[in-house]
Amino acid sequence: MAERTSLAGARVALPTGVVESGQVTVADGRIVSAGPDDAAAGAGAAGTDRIDLAGHLIVPGFVDVHVHGGGGASFSAGKTEEALRVIDTHRRHGSTTMLASTVTGDLDEVAQQAHVLSELVQQGELAGVHFEGPFISPHRCGAHEPTLLRDPDPADVRKLIDAARGTAKMMTLAPELPGGLDSVRLLVDAGVIAAVGHTDSTYDATREAIDAGASVATHLFNAMPSLLHRAPGPVAALLEDERITVELINDGTHLHPATLELAFRSAGADRVAFITDAMGAAGMEDGIFPLGPMQVEVKDGVARISDGPTAGSIAGSTLTLDQVFRRAVSVDRLSIDQTVRALSSTPARVLGLEDRIGSIEPGKDADLVVLDSDYALVGVMRRGAWVVRPTAG
């Protein structure tokens, strides 16, 4: 077995820009060298498996900080086998790092889900647990069961943090609710990212949450008041503040292309994190799928709540991040550098993992995605092992 693998002849997206004829050499699960192909460190040496990827593009593994399900499975099922199916589905589409996002449910049930998911974090399969709900606004609940919503009492917030046994990474809440600001402070003190989302907050109340320590906007524009000229609301507060990273769902349904462009122009790629917000239908055909206690119908790839008081509401997405990459560069005309930042380096920084993942640099984990000339995924490597091995070479 070769001790080293050299991916050669490809375009390589480095932090300094795209190298047109480059190489990435990997050994022991880490990147050894990356740069022009003629500078490949030991690429032709004995014991090196050289794979010719001319005509392809190598980018860092994608980092998804907001995903609920995929492959017909859900993190909210509270079952290890389902969680592993979600992970496998998205990993095969390039998400080499991800948080497991829960949805609103009975507090004890969500706590139990976090307990199960924490084991997979400890095993290195997940980067952490993200709680989306139940501490969100009933006026902006979207695909969350309205009867199970509750105010963010710090004691309840603490209960979920403790249930995750040190693996809680992010919690989405509506800071204008009673206990909201105290809960933001609690989260920050506990080392958990406080995210503003599913909120009916005003501009001023959102500013208070940011000053209290909130640092992420959960799927900006969606499930929050629109930007108005006399009531700028949370959108303006979140876009203008350099302390905030904004999540965007780039599927052509959640956001108009002009809205996406506005976010990039306002925040820049260093403050945008593309997410899937995917539910169980990601990677599947149309059909009926569960989302926590709700039922979702997927038609033409768009997921909506099928019945109840929130029927018709968009229920997450059916995205995988390779689709997001392709749309960003082919439809939205973002540069490869902007897209890589929004899919890899920025979310890695949000998670505090930029020293290990998020860019192609020596010493970092060998998490790589190989795309063909049309930006379709053909290969995925995670920690030096092929998840999807490219057929080229």
Image (cartoon, helix red, strand yellow):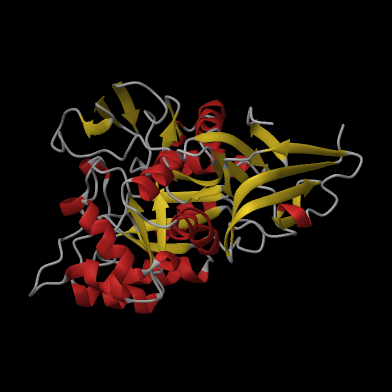
Image x and y of residue 257, in percent: 24, 52
Give the position of the C terminus as an image quadrant.
top right
Image x and y of residue 373, in percent: 50, 39
Q: Residue furthest right?
A: 46
Q: Is residue 281 visible?
A: yes
Image-quadrant location for residue 68: top left
Q: Is residue 91 left or right of residue 68?
A: right
Q: Is residue 185 left or right of residue 151?
A: right
Give the position of the N terminus as an image quadrant.
top right
Image x and y of residue 305, in percent: 21, 32
Image-quadrant location for residue 6: top right
**Going 20% across and 66% down the picture, which residue do you hit?**
201
Q: Is residue 222 visible?
A: no
Q: Is residue 352 left or right of residue 47?
A: left
Most foreground residue, 350 or 92: 92
Count of labels in the image: 0
**Going 43% across and 34% down the picture, which residue do you hit?**
69
**Going 34% across and 76% down the picture, which residue do you hit?**
241
Image-quadrant location for residue 271: bottom left
Image x and y of residue 353, in percent: 61, 60
- Asked if 280 appears above or below 232 in the picture, the reply is above
Q: Residue furthest left?
A: 230
- Asked if 46 appears above or below 187 in the picture, the reply is above
Most foreground residue, 247 or 328: 328
Most foreground residue, 259 or 231: 259
Most foreground residue, 205 or 65: 65
